Amino acid sequence: MSARIGGNLADIARTAGVMTDTGGAATAAGQDASAVAGRMESEVEAVTATLRAHFEQLAEELRGRISSARQQLGATDWEGASRGAADAAETRLHGEVDRVLATAIDDVEAFRTFMLTQATDFVGGVQGQFGGVMGEIDAAYQDLATGSRTFAEQLEAADRSVSFGR
């Protein structure tokens, strides 16, 4: 009969180890989720920097085309109201490009702020709720492992008592 109890003790000890590992895995999963959520901020920054650079490049290209068209007109021999209108049109177009660029940059910043707020809220939720749940699971598995070890120790003590009684 002692072999059976001894075999069961080994199974219980092995199970306690698995429970400890499982609890640790739950904690690690919570930490991994927090790390992934934390990377969201850098990704949002990268996306908004790319958008900002793209809009600035487009605006620069438009300004270049406007100036190039104005230079081509300037090379012609003409005077009067038409030339003044062309000069005013160039100035107005540069102003419009600047206005559209400013609006686009403002929209990119609003997008960035919104996304960072969402990322921060998500990270807080992950760390708070998910992390708390995973911590509770870890604690429960640790308690179960401790209980299993205590049970195994008690069975081993009973096994020794039975052996001495023979």
Image (tube, grey):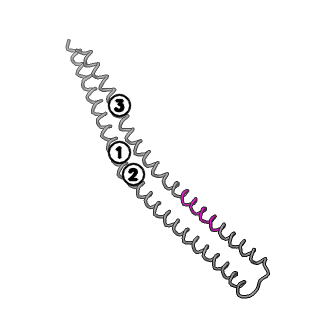
Whole-number angstrom distance, CA of label 1 to CA of label 2? 12 Å
Residue occupying image coordinates x 70% and y 84%:
82
Residue occupying image coordinates x 39% and y 42%:
27
* Quadrant of the drawing holding the N terminus: top left
Q: Nearer the viewer, residue 139 or 128?
A: 128
Most common SS among magenta residues: helix
- The kind of residue tagged 2 is Val
Q: Looking at the rendered structure, which numbered label has been put on residue 135?
A: 1
Q: Secondary structure at mark 1?
A: helix
- The kind of residue tagged 3 is Val
Which residue is denoted by mark 2 in the rendering?
126
Circle 1/circle 2 CB separation < 8 Å: no
Taking the image as shown, residue 49 lies to the left or right of residue 121, namely right
Q: Is residue 26 above or below residue 63?
A: above
* Quadrant of the drawing holding the C terminus: top left
Whole-number angstrom distance, CA of label 3 to CA of label 2? 26 Å
Q: Position of residue 161 (x, y in %)?
A: 22, 19
Q: Which segment is the magenta one?
A: 46-59
Q: Is residue 85 magenta?
A: no
